[in-house]
């Protein structure tokens, strides 16, 4: 499903409201809300709206468990760090228990960090289905999403939920299709004219996830929502 907004602010407000709504539904259904945040720049404004009333007051933050879809393997202090952005824009402004926030600490050894994060996720889901209630994803101009890049070996992963991506600089750690595609809802946030070409390819071209990894996101028994602004869908 495609939701089109007039501008980045309208898109961001809608993404914040979506988070609050899904949180309410999930907490009613299972007592907790498991969400994976996206990095990059597009989600920052949505996180800032979520940190403000009315969205802020609509969420039972003590029931929220935050994970990330991917991370750049740089220290938390580095402005490229995805967790840092989310802490600045949202997590330091809402009453969420610190032990329910799970950044991907991977500045040291990406492979070891990926294995560590997989253990954290397997402990968290335990006997429950490993289904995130909501996953926010972005779309790179080359069709990558999370840190699943075109032609990357990570695209072929069938078993592990988290892998290191070392063919890029800085290296990355990313969730894989086997875990991402178990989500109840994946919401792509796509903004700006520079994304118009790739958005048309991803939505209109025959499926080729090796070329456009975002096409590999197909939640089994779940849904995909595209929140896009008018500039990004100008070629659709
Ligand atoms: C990352 C992201 C990545 C991002 C896209 C879009 O760590 O970079 O997880 O997948 O979502 O590159 O980034 P922008 O929103 O900055 O265009």
Image: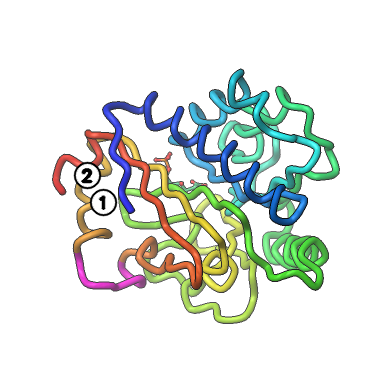
Q: Is residue 186 magenta?
A: no
The range drawn in magenta is 205-211
Q: Is residue 210 magenta?
A: yes
Q: Is residue 107 in sight in this rendering? A: no
Name the residue located 31 percent from the left edge and 68 percent from the top edge. Answer: 211
User: Mark 1 highlights which residue?
Assistant: 199
User: Mark 2 highlights which residue?
Assistant: 196
The residue at the far front in this view is: 28
- Colour approach in the figure: rainbow
The answer to whether 201 is drawn above or below residue 10 in the figure is below
User: Which quadrant of the render holds ligand 1?
Assistant: top left
* Mark 2 surroundings within 10 Å by alpha-carbon count, few (fewer than 14), some (14 through 19), many (20 or more): many
The answer to whether 147 is drawn above or below residue 193 in the figure is below
- Is 62 in front, or is 167? 62
| Disc 1 element | helix
Measured as percent of width and height from the top left, residue 144 is found at 39, 57
Callout 2–callout 1 Cβ contact below 8 Å = yes
Residue 150 picture quarter = bottom left
Name the residue located 49 percent from the left edge and 72 percent from the top edge. Answer: 220
Measured as percent of width and height from the top left, residue 172 is found at 58, 55
Residue 78 picture quarter = top right
- Is 112 in front, or is 68? 68
Total numbered circles: 2
| Disc 2 element | helix
The answer to whether 164 is drawn above or below residue 159 in the figure is above
């Amino acid at each position: 499903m495609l939701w089109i907004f007039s501008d980045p602010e309208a898109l961001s407000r809608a993404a914040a409201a979506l988070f609050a709504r899904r949180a309410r539904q999930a907490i009613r259904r299972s007592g907790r809300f498991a969400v994976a945040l996206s990095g990059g720049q597009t989600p920052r404004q949505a996180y800032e709206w979520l940190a403000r009333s009315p969205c802020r007051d609509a969420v039972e933050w003590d029931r929220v468990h935050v994970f990330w879809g991917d991370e750049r393997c740089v220290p938390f202090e580095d402005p490229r760090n995805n967790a840092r952005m989310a802490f600045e824009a949202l997590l330091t402004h809402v009453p969420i228990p610190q032990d329910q926030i799970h950044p991907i600490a991977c500045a040291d050894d990406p492979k070891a960090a990926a294995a560590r994060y997989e253990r954290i996720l397997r402990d968290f889901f335990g006997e429950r289905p490993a289904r995130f209630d909501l996953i926010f994803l972005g779309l790179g101009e080359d069709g990558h999403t999370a840190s699943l890049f075109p032609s990357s070996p990570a695209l072929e992963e069938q078993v592990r939920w988290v892998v290191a991506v070392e063919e890029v600089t800085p290296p990355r750690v990313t969730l894989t299709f086997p875990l991402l595609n178990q989500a109840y809802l994946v919401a792509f946030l796509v903004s700006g004219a520079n994304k118009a070409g790739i958005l048309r390819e991803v939505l209109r071209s025959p499926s080729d996830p090796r070329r456009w990894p975002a096409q590999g996101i197909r939640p089994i028994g779940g849904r995909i929502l595209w929140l896009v602004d008018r500039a990004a869908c100008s070629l659709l």
